[in-house]
Image (cartoon, rainbow, N blue to C red):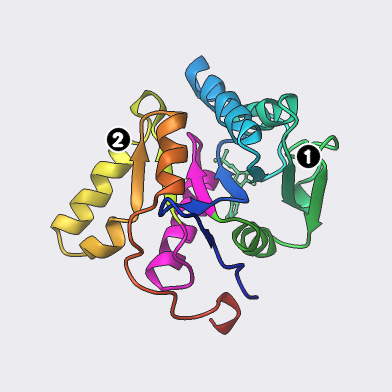
């Protein structure tokens, strides 16, 4: 699997064709989570950036897709066959990819996307987020990863990352690429102008 090269722009940034968003299948306890998801979906669509996500129709995932589709966005949903009914996979996506396993889902989301955003979510969101961060640590990719910190939802997680660095379990160079954004606009800016990759891509996913 060969990742597409990121197109450099003449202002030093990266041209994003598609961004993958990890987020909750549940709505969470605050309207702000859904509002931020809808706003992110809309902003991606208005900038002509394709959205890649888990294809779910409920919760934060549903709000994200609503925002993108209402603004005429290009949305790709990737979902394992076994979850199509359970997660109410949306049939109104321009591109719905039904795959055979969770592993295939994550590999395809990674392959299709130029960068990653995490919105508030639960264990599935954490798992997807940390897998993509650890793939970066291994040198499988050098794509930007941004946590959209709605209502400071990710503050304990960001503090845990800093604690892990302070305690010598995570290298500062592996913590550094995980960026926090306080708004949709800031998240897009961080994706388009990522920090210098901690290290060059060393291996391909299918080599591991
Ligand atoms: P959650 O954050 O738990 O609401 O889940 C959000 C999304 O993550 C859902 O689409 C889940 O199917 C997905 N998910 C849950 N577990 C995993 C996993 N192990 N790998 C990839 N995606 C997962």
Q: Position of residue 143 (x, y in %)?
A: 47, 59
| Residue 49 disc label | none
Please tell me which residue lies in front, 132 or 67.
67
Is 135 on the left-hand or right-hand side of 63? left
Instruction: Determine whether the beta carbon of the residue marked 2 sits less than 8 angstroms from the nearest atom of ligand 1.
Output: no
Q: Say if the magenta span includes residue 118.
A: yes
Please tell me which residue lies in front, 199 or 99.
199
Q: Residue at x 42, y 73 (%)?
A: 139
Q: Earlier in the sequence, mark 1 or mark 2?
A: 1
Task: Label 1, secondary structure: give it.
Answer: loop
- Graded by Cα atoms within 10 Å as few (under 14), some (14 to 19) or many (20 or more), the crowding at tag 2 reads some
The magenta span reads: 115-143
Residue placed furthest toward the right: 91
Task: Label 2, secondary structure: give it.
Answer: helix
Is 96 on the left-hand or right-hand side of 122? right
Q: Within the image, what quadrant is residue 87 found in?
A: top right
Note whether 2 is above or below 185 in the view shown.
Answer: below
Q: Position of residue 119 (x, y in %)?
A: 49, 36
Note whether 161 is above or below 138 in the view shown.
Answer: above
Residue where numbered disc 2 is placed? 155
How far apart are the alpha carbons under marks 1 and 2?
Answer: 30 Å
Note whether 196 is above or below 182 in the view shown.
Answer: below
Q: Quadrant of the N terminus?
A: bottom right
């Amino acid at each position: 699997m060969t990742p597409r090269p990121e197109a450099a722009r003449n202002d030093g940034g990266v041209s994003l064709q598609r961004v993958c968003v990890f987020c909750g299948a549940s709505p969470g306890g605050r309207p702000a989570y859904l509002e931020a998801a809808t706003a992110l979906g809309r902003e991606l669509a208005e900038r002509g950036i394709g959205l890649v996500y888990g294809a779910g129709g409920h919760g934060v995932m549903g709000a994200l897709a609503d925002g993108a589709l209402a603004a005429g966005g290009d949305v790709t949903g990737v979902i394992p066959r076994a979850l199509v009914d359970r997660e109410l996979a949306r049939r109104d996506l321009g591109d719905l990819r039904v795959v055979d396993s969770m592993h295939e889902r994550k590999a395809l989301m990674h392959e299709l996307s130029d960068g990653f955003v995490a919105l508030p979510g639960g264990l599935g969101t954490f798992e997807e987020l940390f897998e993509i961060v650890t793939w970066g640590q291994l040198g499988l990719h050098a794509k930007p990863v941004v946590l959209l910190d709605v209502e400071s939802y990710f503050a304990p997680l960001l503090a845990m990352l800093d604690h892990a660095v302070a305690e010598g379990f995570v290298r500062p160079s592996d913590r550094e690429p995980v960026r926090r954004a306080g708004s949709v606009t800031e998240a897009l800016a961080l994706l388009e102008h990522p920090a210098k990759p901690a290290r060059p891509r060393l291996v391909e996913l299918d080599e591991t």
